[in-house]
Image: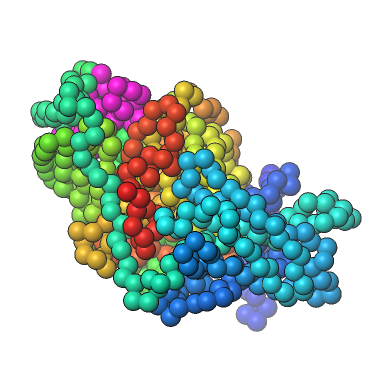
């Protein structure tokens, strides 16, 4: 099919003129679109489509609600569970039958509660009686041993499956499913309760007194050592992080730095940099130039995109290219100064620089970065991004891109999954703890490669090798409501694969990407504070809803935490010990 030359003839009868267009559409956009591949393999979007079309809708009906607790969160699948001494209020879920001529008696119902902060992946199955049509499900949470004094880490999933075989699906097929977050609130503290700001990770000395953290700097490298062993190397001129390893352990970011002053390290690549670009998707490429490109030369399209009122009609990809946010030619970080400060058991390396467009040389953002590492090897990378131009173009993403060592291909994360999901298409992806590999997450489901594989609402993600050593990644953001000096943990977006964003953006077909396997190639990881939606209503024009666009004229301040761990350590336990909370409404664990 793709070898056929298609002729499009448009007759304009009113003016007795016609335009004869001959175009090879397969050289621009493939025929293989939609939510299924030609081999009938469903794309991840099928999960979202199924969730939106499922014949049963769910809503929470709290038996008691206090005006102080009522907020917009109440409409976002959050259930308030009131705690009176040791008793928990029952949970009532309303089911609305969306069938036209069928009841719900053919479905069997189940309920599971999970604790995403548990080190043992605790889960409880609750007995559920079949509801009546448009009826209710009443659930009793007493006797499960739920930790009601901690973070809001419990999630409840209601599932309706076929009770018997049918001509179109077998018994046990999931017909309807929804998930709710359980928020425990002491009844006697509801009124007038002030929000408490979670504590950030304590960057204090955690190792034995014999451990000695030191820092040295020259014209080429700034090196942090622990007992003379290099654990962090930053380029003194560019401010880029070149290498990071676990003390007395494995290499985490970049290549080995046992001898960072060797000549062959002069061209060492940056392995952790700010990231504002993404490989364009099919929806990202849809705009007015897609239509006019058939009749106008390519050079005129660049001129047209600069005209007033036309830019917003161009594709997101064209808008990004115009301001210097192309994945083919991503903006570069230009360092102004590097400042090193050492405290007891801590080293801070502060980098002041700018994000500069490679295409036109314009300064897009001022970027302040700080690498702060302690004796345990916990690394906090703080980013403060300030726009320097009046940018009306939505940003593809705001975060960091890093290159992990090839051995850390075993992935575990707490967030939405198991398939890819984005901010504007993640309601059909349930929160849980999932496992994968870099090769599996980096395998594209699309004929034309592009941005893919993102996971939203992640409390953490971890990367480990075959022996169990690795690094856990979490994120914090500045709490502007409590002042810029206060920080709170926030959920992150992440993706991982064996190809760079540049390779994905330049590839026109999957065959253009080299086959790569786990353990043989470096792992390219994106940790994002903000991720723009991907749209989907129409692929011929910009169609991402305003709620899922990233304003390019605002400041961003966040920190990415890299916490190394050894074999046998659990990521949830590590975060609990470091007192990270994923919800701003509670104090963290002591």
Query: Can you see residue 223?
Result: no
Closest to the observer, 216 or 16: 216
Image location (x, y in percent) of residue 385:
25, 55
* 174 is within the stretch colored magenta: no
Residue 316, image quadrant: bottom left
- Identify whether 247 is placed above or below 587: above
Residue at position x 86%, y 55% in the image: 164
Closest to the observer, 310 or 92: 92
Query: Can you see residue 93?
Result: yes
Residue at position x 43%, y 74% in the image: 69
Residue at position x 44%, y 36% in the image: 570
Name the side, left or right, on which 125 lies relative to 263.
right
Residue 547, image quadrant: bottom left
Name the side, left or right, on which 251 lies relative to 482.
right
Image location (x, y in percent) of residue 551:
35, 65
Image location (x, y in percent) of residue 361:
23, 51
- Identify whether 208 is placed above or below 540: above
* 251 is within the stretch colored magenta: yes
- Residue range (magenta): 230-258
Closest to the observer, 423 or 8: 423
Name the side, left or right, on which 178 lies relative to 218.
right
Image location (x, y in percent) of residue 236:
15, 34
Name the side, left or right, on which 169 lies relative to 528.
right
Closest to the observer, 32 or 153: 153
């Amino acid at each position: 099919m793709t070898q056929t030359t298609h002729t499009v003839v448009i007759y304009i009868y009113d003016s007795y003129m016609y335009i004869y267009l001959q175009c090879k559409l397969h050289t621009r956009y493939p025929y293989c679109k939609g939510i299924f591949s030609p081999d009938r393999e469903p794309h991840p979007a099928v999960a979202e489509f199924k969730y939106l079309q499922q014949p049963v809708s769910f809503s929470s009906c709290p038996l008691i609600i206090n005006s102080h607790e009522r907020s917009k969160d109440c409409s976002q699948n959050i259930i308030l569970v009131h705690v009176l001494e040791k008793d928990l209020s029952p949970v009532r879920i309303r089911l609305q039958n969306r069938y036209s001529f069928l009841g719900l008696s053919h479905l069997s119902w189940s309920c599971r509660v999970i604790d995403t902060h548990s080190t043992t992946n605790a889960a409880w199955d609750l007995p559920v009686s079949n509801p009546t049509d448009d009826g209710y499900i009443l659930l009793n949470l007493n006797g499960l041993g739920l930790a009601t004094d901690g973070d809001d880490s419990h999630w409840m999933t209601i599932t309706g499956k076929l009770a018997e075989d049918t001509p179109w699906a077998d018994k046990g097929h999931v017909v309807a499913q929804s998930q709710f977050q359980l928020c425990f609130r002491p009844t006697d503290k509801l009124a007038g309760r002030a929000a408490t700001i979670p504590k950030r990770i304590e960057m204090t000395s955690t190792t034995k007194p014999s451990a000695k953290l030191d820092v040295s700097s020259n014209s080429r490298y700034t090196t942090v050592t622990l007992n003379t062993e290099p654990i962090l190397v930053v380029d003194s001129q560019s401010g880029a992080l070149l290498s990071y390893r676990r003390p007395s352990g494995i290499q985490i970011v970049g290549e080995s730095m046992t001898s960072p002053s060797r000549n062959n390290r002069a061209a060492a690549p940056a392995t952790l940099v700010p990231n504002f670009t993404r490989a364009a998707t099919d929806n990202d490429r849809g705009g007015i130039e897609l239509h006019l490109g058939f009749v106008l030369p390519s050079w005129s399209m660049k001129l047209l995109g600069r005209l007033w009122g036309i830019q917003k009609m161009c594709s997101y990809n064209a808008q990004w290219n115009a301001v210097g946010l192309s994945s083919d030619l991503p903006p570069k970080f230009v360092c102004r100064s590097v400042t090193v400060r050492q405290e007891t058991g801590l080293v801070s390396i502060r980098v002041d620089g700018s994000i500069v467009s490679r295409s036109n040389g314009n300064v897009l953002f001022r970027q302040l970065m700080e690498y702060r590492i302690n004796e345990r090897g916990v690394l906090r990378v703080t980013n403060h991004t300030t726009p320097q131009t009046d940018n009306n173009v939505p940003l593809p993403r705001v975060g960091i891109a890093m290159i992990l060592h090839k051995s850390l291909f075993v992935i575990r994360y707490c967030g939405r999954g198991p398939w890819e999901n984005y901010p504007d298409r993640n309601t059909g992806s349930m929160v849980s703890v999932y496992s994968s590999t870099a090769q599996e997450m980096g395998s594209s489901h699309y004929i034309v490669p592009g941005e893919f594989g993102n996971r939203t609402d992640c409390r953490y993600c971890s990367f480990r090798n075959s022996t169990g050593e690795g690094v856990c990644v979490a994120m914090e953001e500045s709490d502007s409501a409590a002042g810029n000096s206060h920080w709170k943990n926030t959920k992150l977006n992440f993706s991982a694969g064996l190809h760079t964003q540049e390779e994905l953006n330049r590839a026109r077909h999957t065959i253009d990407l080299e086959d790569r396997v786990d353990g043989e190639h470096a792992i390219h990881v994106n940790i994002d504070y903000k991720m723009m939606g991907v749209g989907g209503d129409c692929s011929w024009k910009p169609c991402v809803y305003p709620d899922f666009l990233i304003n390019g004229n605002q400041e961003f301040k966040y920190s990415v935490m890299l916490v190394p761990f050894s074999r046998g350590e659990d990521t949830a336990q590590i975060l609990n010990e470091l007192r990270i909370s994923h919800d701003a409404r509670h104090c963290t664990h002591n």
